[in-house]
Amino acid sequence: MTHVVLESCIRCKYTDCVDVCPVDCFREGPNFLAIDPDECIDCAVCIPECPVNAIVPEEDVPSDQQHFTALNAELSRKWPSITRSKGALPDADQWKDVKDKLGLLQR
């Protein structure tokens, strides 16, 4: 089992979750974080750290965001590991409540 980063992370990329991950399973893209499903140990310590509730257990991914499970797996193979938090994107607060952001994902 793994955890999945959902759409609400797009254009925000808060990285509070990265510092608490005991296995460094987060991968960083230009405007989104992904979880490597092969590295995630399902510990759930990252979930309460996310200010936009973008991380959920795989079994709790909403039906309209099921594609994010495969997307996390795909992007985690391409993107570098991130092991320390950094500042969110400059306009993250403006984007945190916006819906339907998948078209804005930068690969």
Image: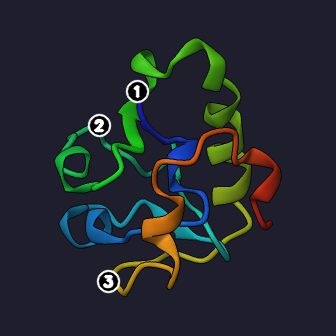
Q: Which residue is mark 1?
A: 1
Are there few (<14), some (14-19), or many (20+) residues within 10 Å of tag 1?
Answer: few
Q: Amino acid at mark 2?
A: Asp
Q: Position of residue 10 (x, y in %)?
A: 60, 57
Q: Residue at x 25, y 61 (%)?
A: 21
Q: Which residue is mark 3?
A: 84
In contact (CB < 8 Å): disc 1 and disc 3: no
In contact (CB < 8 Å): disc 2 and disc 1: yes
Are there few (<14), some (14-19), or many (20+) residues within 10 Å of tag 2?
Answer: some
Q: Residue at x 70, y 56 (%)?
A: 75
- In the image, taking residue 72 as reference, residue 42 lies left or right, namely left
Q: CA distance from mark 3 to mark 2?
A: 19 Å
Are there few (<14), some (14-19), or many (20+) residues within 10 Å of tag 3?
Answer: some
Element class at badge 2: loop
Q: Which residue is mark 2?
A: 42
Q: CA distance from mark 2 to mark 1?
A: 6 Å
Q: Position of residue 65 (x, y in %)?
A: 62, 26
- Residue 100 visible: yes
Q: Earlier in the sequence, mark 1 or mark 3?
A: 1
> Could you tell me which quadrant the N terminus lies in?
top left
